[in-house]
């Protein structure tokens, strides 16, 4: 049994430790992005804002290498999930959900609420649904759409969205919907190349903006599917209500989040400055280095090595470590992480390493984890830091 030997003592509270926000969203918001939210708000019809909104809409297409329509709307990732289904499926249509965890499963509830027939292919948490199984399932019924969560934040499993997209060329009628909430701008996600019809994300993940915006891309095939539906019962998420605004942002449908869109603009500027390919490479380097370092400290990563995400790690505790005590101690040591979900609640913590974070954040958060372990009588001081330092200078 691991013994917790920590008592609050001199040194813990005489300096206030800076808290690194390492939950898998919201992620840290850089100073220059924060500053945009503090600006004096102006009218959404102001020519300066219209220009800024247009910049976002134009540049967002480049980030996912797509010539599709793009929607930037107030709301979170869940609203984008709803928007993706509402605009291409009607009651009685067939949807195949490929689920690698909690957020994959969320599509089931949303679809059932709409009277859509849902079939589900689920993997054991940490594993991935084989592509052959997806192909065989699609042959059995006339499916209208398929949903795949690129990175399921509950398991840290990354789906092979490129190979699935390739396979889907055999089924040209099916709309391919990808949830990129925990992936876009941190994992490779190129819509045209990967044959994706609808992709969406939210502002608070790898874009490093505060929560409050969803971004959804829909290609020509998806827009045609919307046309075929005619009138739909949803109002706020109807593509038809937003499309005129996305083509001419001075028009009104519902008030845009002026300051968040400025923040998004700055985030896009930072992404373009880094270069999207470099950014994805950085996320891959950081993700691998981080996971190796955590393993050195005696943790196991839930996701099988073949399917691990760049953007976050889902970290299983060694025997005897009490979850809440660990996370609270780690918070005192300066790092905030998230709890496990579903059956892994209490057995794991989730730590994000996406968006606008740097080597300092990675190394000092590993050092904080080491200090926390030390308080649980596990002396791994400098072991994880040693590994991550070497990985980061390779
Ligand atoms: C993969 C994925 N999809 C959807 C969601 C839902 O997004 P939101 O919490 O912004 O509604 C999340 C949230 O973490 C997520 O990680």
Image: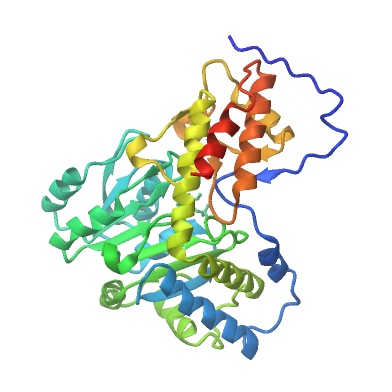
Name above or below for residue 191 compared with residue 167. Answer: below
Q: How many marks?
A: 0
Q: Residue at x 88, y 34 (%)?
A: 14
Q: Residue furthest bottom?
A: 47
Q: Quadrant of residue 233?
A: bottom left
- Residue 311 in view here: no
Outermost residue, front side: 394
Q: Is residue 107 visible?
A: yes
Is residue 328 shown left or right of residue 311? right
> Whole-percent x and y of residue 178?
35, 58
Tell me which colouring the rendered structure shows.
Answer: rainbow
Specify whether 390 is left or right of 89: right
Classify residue 198 as left or right of residue 361.
left
The quarter of the displayed image where residue 349 is located:
top right
Q: Tell me the quarter of the image containing the N terminus.
A: top right
**Image position, residue 275 (x, y; %):** 48, 66
Which residue is drawn at the image coordinates 45% and 41% (left, top)? 288
Q: Left of 212 or right of it: where is 239?
A: left
Rendered location of residue 104, percent (x, y):
37, 47
Residue lying at the far top of the rendered structure: 1
Residue displayed at 32% across by 60% down: 177
Q: Residue at x 52, y 16 (%)?
A: 319
- Give the answer, above or below, for where 247 lies relative to 132: below
Q: Is residue 259 above or below residue 160?
A: below
Q: Give whichever of 47, 379 is nearer the camera.
A: 379
Q: Position of residue 201 (x, y in %)?
A: 46, 60
């Amino acid at each position: 049994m691991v013994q917790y030997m920590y008592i609050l003592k001199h040194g813990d509270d005489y300096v206030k430790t800076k808290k690194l926000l390492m939950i898998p969203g919201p992620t840290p918001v850089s100073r220059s992005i924060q500053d945009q939210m503090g600006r004096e708000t102006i009218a959404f019809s102001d020519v300066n804002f219209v220009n800024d909104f247009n910049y976002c809409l134009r540049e967002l297409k480049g980030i996912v290498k797509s010539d599709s329509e793009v929607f930037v709307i107030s709301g979170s990732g869940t609203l984008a999930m709803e928007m993706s289904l509402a605009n291409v499926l009607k009651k009685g249509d067939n949807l195949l959900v490929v689920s690698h965890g909690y957020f994959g499963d969320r599509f089931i509830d949303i679809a059932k609420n709409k009277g859509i027939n849902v079939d589900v292919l689920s993997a054991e948490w940490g594993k991935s649904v084989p592509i052959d199984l997806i192909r065989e399932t699609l042959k059995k019924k006339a499916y209208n759409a398929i949903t795949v969560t690129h990175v399921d934040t509950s398991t840290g499993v990354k789906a092979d969205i490129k190979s699935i997209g390739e396979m889907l060329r055999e089924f040209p009628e099916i709309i391919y919907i990808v949830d990129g909430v925990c992936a876009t701008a941190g994992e490779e996600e190129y819509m045209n190349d990967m044959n994706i019809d609808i992709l969406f994300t939210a502002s608070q993940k790898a874009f490093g903006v505060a929560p409050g915006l969803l971004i959804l891309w829909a290609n020509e095939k998806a827009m045609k599917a919307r046309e075929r539906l005619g009138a739909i019962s949803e109002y706020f998420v109807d593509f038809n209500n937003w499309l005129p605004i996305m083509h001419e942002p001075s028009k009104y449908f519902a008030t845009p989040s002026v300051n968040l869109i400025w923040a998004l603009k700055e985030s896009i500027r930072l992404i373009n400055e880094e270069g999207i390919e470099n950014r994805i490479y950085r996320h891959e380097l950081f993700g691998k280095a981080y996971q190796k370092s955590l393993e050195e400290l005696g943790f196991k990563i839930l996701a099988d090595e073949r399917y691990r995400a760049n953007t976050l790690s889902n970290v299983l505790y060694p025997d005897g470590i009490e979850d809440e005590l660990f996370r609270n101690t780690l918070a005192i040591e300066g790092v905030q992480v998230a709890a496990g979900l579903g059956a892994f609640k209490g057995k794991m913590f989730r730590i994000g390493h996406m968006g606008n974070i740097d080597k300092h954040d990675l190394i000092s958060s590993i050092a904080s984890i080491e200090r926390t372990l030390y308080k649980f009588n596990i002396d791994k001081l400098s072991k994880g830091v040693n590994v991550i330092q070497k990985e980061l200078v390779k």
